[in-house]
Amino acid sequence: MRLDQWLCARLPELSRTRIKTLIDQGRVRLDDRPTKAARRLRAGERVEAEIPPPPSEDLEPEPIALAVVFEDTDVLVVDKPAGMVTHPGAGHRTGTLAAAALAHAPEMAGVGGPRRPGIVHRLDKGTSGLIVLAKTQRAYDALTAQLARRRVTRRYLCLVHGTPRAAEGVIDRPMIRDPRSRVRMAVAPAGKGRRAVTRFRVLERFTGLAFVECHLETGRTHQIRVHMASIGHPLLGDETYGGRNRRQSDPELERLLDRLEGVALHATGLAFAHPVTGAACEFVSPLPYRIQGVLSHLRSRLS
């Protein structure tokens, strides 16, 4: 029998993928020597497997500077830079907004979940802008309920390839995980996926590009990026959904795009009812230079 199959039968609590990883890491030894998963076992051979303990579910605080827009005893609103991951995930264990927020407000520990303390909603790594975190469980429950009832307003600004024909419109297309890639989302076939609705309005048109405002009615992963790409207008800088392979004839524009440091998408507006007092809370974040610089250059070409 193959080594990996033999171990699967004796370690049913571990997946076959996990067992193969242990073998590849040299943690499984055959007669005191590293071996391969496909090795056929023989009678009398001795197999030893070292199984390290699972990583701690507790998130370690990290003293990373945050751009705090608003804070009280219940709520923390932050202007997240592009390049920062919202919470730990595959390939991103440190340097996250969640770890920075936990260092800033230790009382958030345990609110909502051990690896995502206070995280009510998320922004993609390459997206900048406003995000709200809950500092207490009461605030977390109230804010997540507002999100579920679509009472949280989220407004985004982005630069897209091409110029949409319609001045404004609604993209109402369900979304699913792309069956060809675990890191991508996709528009779902009719009758499948979860409903996703994005409203967009063209603010300015340029040669081959447009400045667009988007409002989320739902909050699916990569929603704006997938929806705009689905109508033929992927976001600038978006390598995942086709917004990076379109080169420009303008050298200065190319230089600005190379320094975009993410996707040309910024969460510029956020509004919700305060989870405890009920007061209307509304916040605005100006475009960061990484996008404003591109926009200014495009405007200068028109003059």
Image: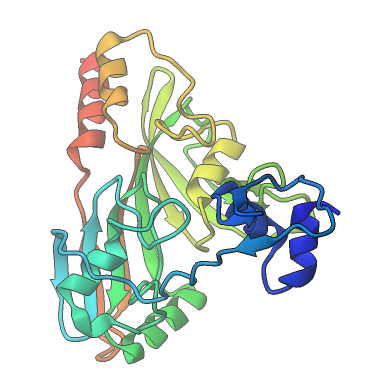
- Considering depth in this image, is 158 or 186 the residue closer to the camera? 186
Name the image quarter holding the C terminus: top left
Q: Residue at x 18, y 77 (%)?
A: 105
Viewed as shown, does residue 156 lie left or right of 222?
left
- Considering depth in this image, is 202 or 265 the residue closer to the camera? 265
Residue 172 place in picture, x, y as percent = 62, 53
Viewed as shown, does residue 87 lie left or right of 269?
right
Viewed as shown, does residue 104 lie left or right of 260?
left
Q: Residue at x 66, y 59 (%)?
A: 19
The answer to whether residue 207 of the structure is visible from this angle is yes
Q: Is residue 167 above or below residue 169?
A: above
Residue 94 place in picture, x, y as percent = 31, 57
Q: Residue at x 35, y 84 (%)?
A: 110
Viewed as shown, does residue 100 lie left or right of 161?
left
Residue 206 quadrant:
top left
Name the image quarter holding the N terminus: bottom right
Residue 194 quadrant:
bottom right
Residue 247 place in picture, x, y as percent = 43, 15
Residue 281 place in picture, x, y as percent = 24, 75
Q: Is residue 175 above or below residue 278?
A: above
- Considering depth in this image, is 177 or 46 the residue closer to the camera? 46
The answer to whether residue 172 of the structure is visible from this angle is no
- Considering depth in this image, is 258 or 181 the residue closer to the camera? 181
